Amino acid sequence: MKNNLQIVMSLLNSQSAYLHNDDALVAIRDSQHRVQAISLIHKKLYQSDNVGVIHMPHYIHELVDYLKDCFDTNRKVSFRIDVSPLQLDVSQAVPIGLILNEAITNSIKYAFTGNREGIIAISFKQSEEGHYTLVIADDGKGLPADFDPAQSRSLG
């Protein structure tokens, strides 16, 4: 699986070399981040003694480090990570990883415009047996006063 994901990453890299449209390049980069989020999960599986479960604190820290490097936050954005020592199976970890990727990417790109510094806080805890609470928050500029979620075509 990891090799297949690396092939997908290589194909996306090759495709981006021929693109001159900024929107298309952003879409390719966003896809690369999603594939990398899944690839990190499989990397963790192969490093684990218990194949099939992901140690979430390690995974989340590694995903955050990857995204910080990708977006070159230059210490402009700091992270506060509070993750319980949870272990999830792959079917649970993949969606959590994709949600984290989307939310963190969105915060980095849009919450701290200009030279504004900020904090992204991530908390992941077990709230009761079989239920978890994931909180991703930032202290960025927030939504415009006239923002209407019913009129939005995205989940950003």
Image (cartoon, rainbow, N blue to C red):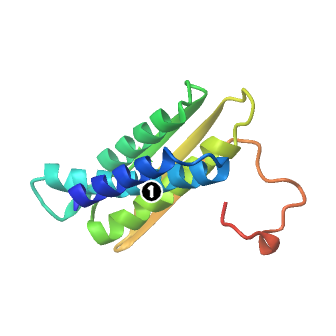
Identify the residue position indicated by label 1 in the image: 34
Residue depicted at 69% across the width and 67% down the height: 154
Q: In this view, does 91 lie to the left or right of 139?
A: left
Residue depicted at 55% across the width and 44% down the height: 121
Residue depicted at 49% across the width and 61% down the height: 99
Query: From the viewer's perspective, is residue 99 above or below residue 36?
Result: below
Q: Residue furthest left?
A: 49
For the C terminus, the image quarter is bottom right
Mark 1 Cα within 10 Å, few/some/many (few <14, many 20+)? some
Tell which of 127 and 13 is nearer to you: 13
Q: Residue furthest front?
A: 18
Q: Is residue 118 left or right of residue 66?
A: right
Residue depicted at 70% across the width and 37% down the height: 112
Image coords of residue 106 (percent x, y): 62, 50
Tell which of 57 and 20 is nearer to you: 20
Task: Count the marks.
Answer: 1
Q: Quadrant of residue 126?
A: bottom left
Image coords of residue 21 (percent x, y): 65, 49
Q: In this view, does 8 lie to the left or right of 21?
A: left
Image coords of residue 60 (percent x, y): 38, 48
Image coords of residue 58 (percent x, y): 30, 45
- Amino acid at dot 1: Arg
Q: In which quarter of the image is residue 110?
A: top right
Q: In this view, does 133 lie to the left or right of 128?
A: right
Residue 144 in view, yes or no: yes
Q: In which quarter of the image is residue 7?
A: bottom left
For the N terminus, the image quarter is bottom left
Tell which of 149 and 30 is nearer to you: 30
- Indicate the secondary structure of the residue bearing disc 1: helix
Residue 136 in view, yes or no: no
Query: From the viewer's perspective, is residue 6 above or below residue 111?
Result: below
